[in-house]
Amino acid sequence: MAKVLIVDDEKSIRNTLAEFLRKEGYEVETAEEVNQALALLRVTEFDLVITDIVMPRISGIELLQQIRQSNPDIQVIIMTGEPTVDTAVKAVQVGAYDYISKPIVKSMLIKVVKQAIHLKGVTDKKKLLEYKNHQYQKNLEQLVEERTKALHNSMQSTIMVLASMVSLRDAYTAGHQMRVGNLAAAIGEEMDLAPSMVEGLRVTGYLHDIGKVTLPAEILAKPGKITKLEFEIIKTHAAQGYEILKDLRLPWSVAEVIYQHHERKDGSGYPDGLKNQEIMMEARVLIVADVVEAMSSHRPYRSSLGIEATLKEIRENSGILYDSDVAEACLRLFERSEVDFVISGDFAKTNFVF
Ligand SMILES: [Fe+2]
């Protein structure tokens, strides 16, 4: 039931109007002056206020102004015994719904009240819909965010499990993968590659030697020089890595890039002897990161070749074995000493960075 507040200093008018409106089914309260009206407005949610303009101390226009500040949705009808165009205009300017003159004609009053209450109902419904829509949107955004996070977490743990599989066979390779992933991502950032591609480089680096799980442990852990046959066996790890990961659904071409991570720009690499642009962009980055990390860290069969020798290799073969843009980006990183990936091969110091 709609609630109406009638404000008038004349008791007979208050009572007559209240009776008219109660008979029409409205819930009505009355106030004889503005302060009393404001006190009622603080405790009750009215849909409509009908107020006289000329009252002792505080006018109906001031009441209207105060209502507009605290509750812009309440409809207000102004009435006065001295109708002038100026008062009517002022009343509408400060937000009155309508203006009626005394003496009040019952049918006119009821018509205007009905319209005002109807408008209030429409405004309330619109507000409710807007609120519900906003809440729905908020919940939806939250849900999407939660699902994305859950998906990311499950993808991250899959990658971590896969990457750590290698450490069961070869602890060195597991640490190597972490460092290559982080370095490849740093090079990618230096080259201004898209953030998603940089993340893909990191993940691909973390998994790039996974094919080594298929190699005999004696070869992986063998100290000293390896034979030609052993090297041929080691070379199969690129294609094996592709086989292991080709059905894994990730947002990057991880398996394809891993297949190419031992190719060289001049066609001297393996497994397919691809050249230049035949090698995927991500693989070109991974190739450099792999060489830099492998040369600068300790291997079971030799100690570190040192960072100077490593950078010399990259500098001298930039544009020959290695993509020159990638090689230059990598050299810039080292010149600025921005690469803090661990050269020593200490697995504990290298972490996933997602
Ligand atoms: Fe490899």
Image (cartoon, rainbow, N blue to C red):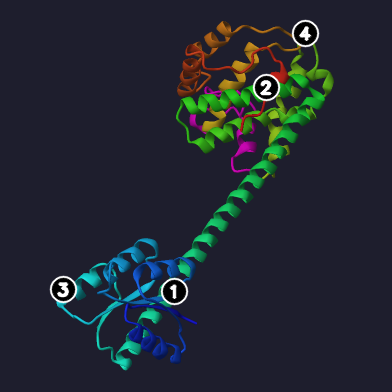
Q: Secondary structure at mark 2?
A: loop
Up-down relation of residue 112 to residue 197 (above or below): below
Mark in the foreground, 1 or 4: 1
**Where is residue 15, by image quadrant?**
bottom left
Q: Is residue 123 above or below residue 350?
A: below
Q: CA distance from mark 4 to mark 3?
A: 104 Å
Which residues fall within the magenta stretch?
250-278
Q: Residue at x 28, y 88 (%)?
A: 104
Q: Earlier in the sequence, mark 1 or mark 3?
A: 1
| Residues packed near mark 3 inside 10 Å, few (<14), some (14 to 19) or many (20 plus) | few
How far is the residue under mark 2 from the one under mark 4?
Answer: 26 Å
Looking at the image, tell me whether mark 1 or mark 4 is earlier in sequence order.
1
The kind of residue tagged 3 is: Asp
Image quadrant assignment for residue 167:
top right
List the residue tagged with mark 2.
350
> Mark 4 falls on what kind of element?
loop
Give the residue number, with chain letter if any, for mark 1. 46
Q: Which residue is mark 4?
A: 224
Closer to us: mark 4 or mark 3? Answer: 3
Image point 47% across, 89% down: which residue?
25
Residue 218 drawn at (x, y percent)? 84, 18
Q: How far from the left and from the top, in percent, is residue 133?
A: 50, 64
Residues marked 2 and 1 touching at CB (< 8 Å):
no
Q: CA distance from mark 2 to mark 3?
A: 80 Å
Gap between marks 1 and 4, in whole Å?
91 Å
- Whichever of callouts 2 and 1 sits on the residue coming sooner in the sequence is 1
What amino acid is at disc 4?
Answer: Gly
Q: Which mark is residue 86?
A: 3
Give whichever of discs 2 and 3 has the lower sequence position: 3
